[in-house]
Image: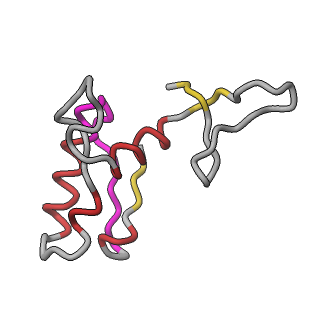
């Protein structure tokens, strides 16, 4: 999927011509879903994982990955690789 690109500070990237940079944005979208709470995407109110809600819980890594996978499937990211081997806090999502 192509969209406006953002840098590590979440600011829009502007190219040398002064225009917004476009490019592959799937990882950005996955990151947005990971952080967003349910209801933040008004057009899709069920979409949003809300990672902050899992910071001090006793949820298993399997349950965490399953719930995250379900949220990603709402946005058509089927069969993502969710790596929690370094703990839930350092989750890596590969689409």
- What is the residue that sits farthest to the right in this orientation? 16
Among the 4 quarters of the image, the one containing residue 43: top left
**Taking 8 as reference, is 17 above or below it?**
above
Spot occupied by residue 44 in the image (x, y as percentages of width and height): 23, 27
Q: Residue at x 22, y 42 (%)?
A: 71
Q: Tell which of 78 and 60 is nearer to you.
A: 60
Q: How is the image coloured?
A: secondary structure
Q: Residue at x 13, y 61 (%)?
A: 63
Spot occupied by residue 18 in the image (x, y as percentages of width and height): 82, 27
**Taking 6 as reference, is 86 above or below it?**
below
Q: Tell which of 13 and 80 is nearer to you.
A: 13
Does residue 84 show up magenta in the picture? yes
Indicate left or right for 92 with 18 as reference. Answer: left
Does residue 38 show up magenta in the picture? no
Q: Could you tell me which quadrant the C terminus lies in?
A: top left
Spot occupied by residue 22 in the image (x, y as percentages of width and height): 65, 27
Q: Which residues are magenta?
A: 72-85
Q: Residue at x 61, y 54 (%)?
A: 8
**Taking 54 as reference, is 31 above or below it?**
above
Q: Residue at x 49, y 42 (%)?
A: 28
Indicate left or right for 65 with 93 as reference. Answer: left
Indicate left or right for 58 with 26 as reference. Answer: left
Spot occupied by residue 89 in the image (x, y as percentages of width and height): 35, 72
Among the 4 quarters of the image, the one containing residue 82: bottom left
Indicate left or right for 90 with 57 as reference. Answer: right
Q: State the count of labels.
A: 0
């Amino acid at each position: 999927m192509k969209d406006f690109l953002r840098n590590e500070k979440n600011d829009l990237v502007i190219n040398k011509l002064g225009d917004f940079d476009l490019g592959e944005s799937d990882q950005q979208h996955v990151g947005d879903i990971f952080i967003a709470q349910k209801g933040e995407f008004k057009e899709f109110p069920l979409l949003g994982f809300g990672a902050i809600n899992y910071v001090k819980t006793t949820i298993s890594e399997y349950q965490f990955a399953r719930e995250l996978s379900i949220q990603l499937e709402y946005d058509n990211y089927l069969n993502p690789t969710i790596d929690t081997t370094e703990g839930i806090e350092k989750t890596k999502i590969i689409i």
